[in-house]
Amino acid sequence: MARLVIDPVTRIEGHLRVEVQVDGDRVAQAYASSTMWRGIETILRGRDPRDAWLFAQRICGVCTTVHALASVRAVEDAIGAVPPLNARLLRQLIAAAQYVQDHVVHFYHLQALDWIDPTAALAADPRRTASLAQSISDYPRSTAALFASVQSRLKAFLASGNIGPFTNGYWGHPAYRLSPELNLMAFSHYLDALEFQREYIRVHALLGGKNPHPQTYLVGGMASPLDPNSQDAINDNTLQELAQRLQAGLDFVHQVYLPDLYAIAGGYREWTGYGGGLRSYLVFGDYSLSPPVTGRPPSDGLFPSGVIRAGGLTVEPFDPAGIAESVAHSWFSYQDGDGAGTLPPWEGQTTPDYTGPEPPFDQLDVAGKYSWLKAPRYQGIAVEVGPLARMLVGYAARDTRIRPLVQAALDRLAVEPAALMSTLGRILARGLETQLMAQYSLELLGRLRDNVAAGDLAIADTARWDPASWPAGQARGVGFHEAPRGSLSHWVVIEDRRVRNYQAVVPSTWNASPRDGEGNPGAYEAALVGTPLADPQRPLEILRTLHSFDPCMACAAHLYDADGRDIVEVRVQ
Amino acid sequence: MTGGHTPPGRGPESDATAVARDRPLPARLAQAGVDRRAFLRFCAGVTATLALPPRYAPQVAAALAQVTRPVVVWLEFQDCAGDTEAFLRSRNPSTSDLILSLISLDYHETLMAAAGAAAEKARDDAVAGGGHILIVEGSVPTGIRGSCTIGGRAADDILRSCARGAAGIINVGTCSAFGGIPAARPNPTGAVRVEDVVSGVPVVNLSGCPVNADNLTATIVHYLTFGALPPTDGFGRPLFAYGERIHDTCPRRGHFDAGQFATEWGDEGHRNGWCLYRMGCKGPSTFHNCPSVRYNDSTSWPIAAGHGCVGCAEPAFWDTMSPFYDRLPHVQTASLDLTADRIGAAVVVGTAVGYALHGVGKIVQHRVGAARDARAAQVAGASSGQDAGGSAESSQDG
């Protein structure tokens, strides 16, 4: 067996390294390592809890806003602040727009190059490309002249010799199997999606001043005033502009993203057979307009809460007390020993303990600690979070919106629900929930408009703004959020009106976690097992499964032998 | 690249495309559907961002017409990819025009097709010849070197080898420029800014959290137009983007001068765009062109959206500007903008001195937190409201 190392794993957020054991033409074992740590939880200690969201938002600039939201929810939970309806609507509007933005960028700019080969688009016939595009969508930018122009631009670019971000791609790899016309259409939409995302995200600027990192959250509410009679507040003009932009988002999803998704999926149907991995799923649940419930995610949200175990399609209720983290294989230490023990987040400790090799190094010691991620577990088991978990739990729970959406997709692809537990199923689920959120965003805007029209302009619970109004002594809070990449929770302990402990358990920690004290792998590690490799020196298939999770970190590839000695550097070109 | 596309043929179109790399920018843009008028409009826009008089627009256009695409290598270290996302929101030229026509972005982990050793080779090949532009996002850990490795190499090692022979370094965001959030108290990984690791290469610091994409585009265009990075202040920040205090260019300044302040979230003053100073706004201590350039195609900026400035373009702002909702110390609203102006000037001088003496992270001259503790004593002990102004003046004199 050979060992393959991919570091940096690119087209993700952050720094991810994967080491896999290859048996013949299949992946036998995989180890995922996060290779970067900043210590934001440590930096938060001792700060004003009202500032925490600004720090926490910087955990990620790709999934910007999600940590801000989880953070203000955690502090509100601790101090008993209740954001008014307008604030809840504004937060959900920002979050819904983030889904559309993030998933479109992931589909086209982070993942598409695993499935489409721009160099193959040069052989396409622009007229046949136009026929293809028009047969699957009424998107207006589907003319032969447009595809001819994109092809000509692409040809000139590739011939220039300086091909920038396309340098050293795995072009011509046997696992690329789409027609030249489909490649040309998809590449054209890669460029269109760059324009789309820039325009669309102005929704965040309208509501929060800028994107990334909108600056509008408050503990207890939002900082964007609402007033139909002011030029300096969210007024009727703003609402009208928001409506146009959100509608443009829904149109792009219907006319471009979903048709492309089905067209590309049609060429790679065997990928419903790879990448399933853990087959256990967790969803906290989110997107309820009811006032928050202390210590729990909402039970009446757009995304139902629940747990699926071992590939079943029955849903158990989620219990927040079931979350705990292991550091047995993580570069942290626990005061009372790292072994098999786990700590629930409120008691969580963040003490760095880098025992990895001094850089530069060629391999990690995967028998010991090998990642900057902790290993979160739910009632002791490893689970997958994210779009697939949400669509499966919604389907299994017979949710009235999610079940028909998923059923229609299953019928269209003529597959059983179990086929969703795969690399392709993960990609499909992401598209389905994008459609759902694009629709939901317009519903939210309607509610906001009605509420403002009824004269409610409240945006914050000002009674809890002054720390003097908070409970004396120690207070604990948790903020749950279903972020685009999955179930997110922030856990805060406040003492003497300052942050005493802060722990974020993020979606990519669930999915990209290393092994726990019992030796159970995380979701990436499990999903990679069984991945076929047509050419191990160009491990395109590994990227497909990794990208299907939309990792929020960054990774390289070297080969060494089964027992980790005598490293053979293989130039992966 | 390793092939897969048809080699250029001999037809007239192929002849043109084969030398695309050396064709002038307007011709490349024309092929991308950007006509001459749009190109000139872009040049006028960039000229404005650079704070140059409009008469420079033709010069910008003439210079850009001559340039070939420079090789750009974008490194990410202790980052959140927020500056990358900001870059993706570029307009005039758009990201696709930037990538396909204006620069050759040979290494960027978030966007590039290649992974693993193929990606590392792209980076090593790009920097081998020198003359490239290096863009850096994120701080560099020097305490725990294992807290940022790529391909098994530590961030400082990669940074040094990529900086060798570079024409210049553009630090995007406050982390690479000044250490940023990883360097905030207690700086668990020993994070430092880029300039603490490399020297001998021209550097500009485009601080901000994240960088404003318009300022990044303008900096690249300035380099392409004038053959050098733009003139900077004492912190390496281009004067065109960081030469003026937010408080002095803020559209709400009139409300400050008139004593009109928002005092509670959602109150009448807040809804009517009054000054956010009492809600903790750090505009009086922050130098950035947010009020004029704004974000996301000039759609908005934080103060316009109703939240105070947090000072994200300033060194060590995570420690010196927080608690973010506490008022800036010493800005005496009774004596209004005279005092605020004095303070602003004092902050610049004081910050510069602190920075030079102690490096990033040890600036105390405008620490908000210290002010919270000192406020009671100040109120009790001050003989008049001018004491605070007096101390600011002495800082300024010093």
Image (tube, rainbow, N blue to C red):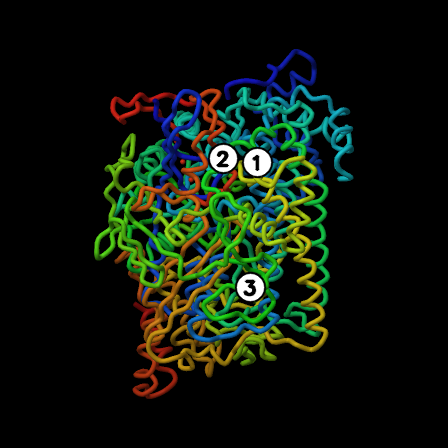
- Give the left or right position of residue B203, taking residue A565 as reference: right
Which dot marks residue A299? 3
Residue type at tag 2: Gly
Disc 1 or 2, which lies upstream in sequence? 2
Q: Distance between the residues labelled 1 and 2?
A: 8 Å
Count neighbours of disc 3 (C-alpha within 10 A) and say few if under 14, some if 14 to 19, many if 20 or more.
Answer: some
Q: Distance between the residues labelled 3 and 2?
A: 30 Å
Disc 3 or 2, which lies upstream in sequence? 2
- Give the left or right position of residue A55, taking residue B98 as reference: left
Q: Do the residues labelled 3 and 2 touch (CB within 8 Å)?
A: no
Q: Distance between the residues labelled 3 and 1?
A: 29 Å
In front of the other: A570 or B338: A570
Disc 3 or 1, which lies upstream in sequence? 3
Q: Are marks 1 and 2 in contact (CB under 8 Å)?
A: yes
Give the image location of residue A545, x and y in percent: 49, 35
- Give the left or right position of residue B395, taking residue A264 as reference: left
Residue type at tag 1: Leu
Give the image location of residue B39, x and y in percent: 66, 39
Q: Please give the name of the residue rendered at 29% of the width and 58% of the height, measured from the top-left corner.
A: A349
Q: Specify the quadrant of the image occupied by residue B326.
A: bottom left
Give the image location of residue A102, x and y in percent: 57, 47
Q: Please give the name of the residue rendered at 70% of the width and 15% of the height, measured from the top-left corner.
A: B12
In front of the other: A316 or B234: A316
Give the image location of residue A238, x and y in percent: 68, 63
Residue ID for mark 2: A275
Task: Write down the chain letter for disc 1.
Answer: A
Residue ID for mark 1: A424
